[in-house]
Image (spheres, rainbow, N blue to C red):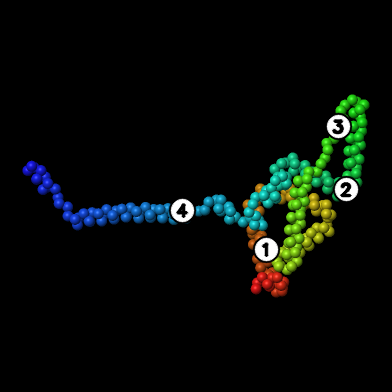
Amino acid sequence: MADEHKHEESLPNLDPAVEVVERGSLMDKISEKIHHKGGSSSSSDDESEKKPSSPSSLKSKVYRLFGRERPVHKVLGGGKPADIFMWKNKKMSGGVLGGATVAWVLFELMEYHLLTLLCHVMIVALAVLFLWSNATMFIHKSPPKIPEVHIPEDPLLQLASGLRIEINRGFSSLHEIASGRDLKKFLSALFGLWILSILGGCCSFLTLAYIALVLLFTVPLVYDKYEDKVDSYGEKAMAELKKQYAVLDAKVLSKIPRGPLKDKKKD
């Protein structure tokens, strides 16, 4: 019992003030750790903000010709026509371009008339099929199977609907230009019609259509292959055109009186 009493006396008596100080130091350490974690997270956020943007975001900011945001294949409408113009199916693309070239040579260089050509082709085809069908009776062979040709309704209706939409869009653009709402569109239309009149005086409509078809088979393909270089040159050209247009607008166009619709919009 004496030993236990001595042991209890040897234990230090903790003062309440000392306990408060120890608790305060412990709270200080915990707060320091919390601030340290918060600072590290904020520094990581700052570092993430300082990091350069991803290549995809930089690519989206690159200038594209005529404000294009979709691939060239989608701009051409997608589907089989775009596949033909982009040479996805080389046999079909070559066949269409070759057929157009043969037609241009026949009608433009050899000065063959369309009605004459159609009649000659029908005469040859009907004569060959008629003689072949009658000859099988003498040589004891089965007659040729001539397929029945029918024009499907759905593709024809889709083509007519697409043509109707494009024609109406052209009429609305002409109406907007003629009403004096946009001077830039008016000047662009005049310039385009003037260029077409010059080209029409140099060659026939068939030659113009053939040149347009050849351009459709070559320009999109070349542009899709070298679009970055073409877009950089196009950006420089558009910047120069905007400068020249600003000078022309300040010296000439701003002095031309606007139409009544333009004045109402400003009011």
Q: Position of residue 251 (x, y in %)?
A: 69, 72
- Spatial distance from mark 3 to mark 2, Cα to Cα? 29 Å
Tell me: 36 left or right of 197.
left
The quadrant where residue 67 appears: bottom right
The numbered dot on residue 93 is none
Residues packed near mark 4 inside 10 Å, few (<14), some (14 to 19) or many (20 plus): few
> Tag 3: residue type?
Pro
> Nearer the N terminus, badge 2 or badge 1?
2
> Tag 1: residue type?
Leu
> Tag 4: residue type?
Ser
Residues packed near mark 3 inside 10 Å, few (<14), some (14 to 19) or many (20 plus): few
Residue corresponding to mark 3: 144
> Tag 2: residue type?
Leu
Residue corresponding to mark 4: 48
- Spatial distance from mark 2 to mark 1, Cα to Cα? 44 Å
User: What residue is at 69 percent from the left and 69 percent from the top?
Assistant: 248
| Closer-to-camera residue (235/256) | 256
Residue corresponding to mark 1: 241
The quadrant where residue 122 appears: top right
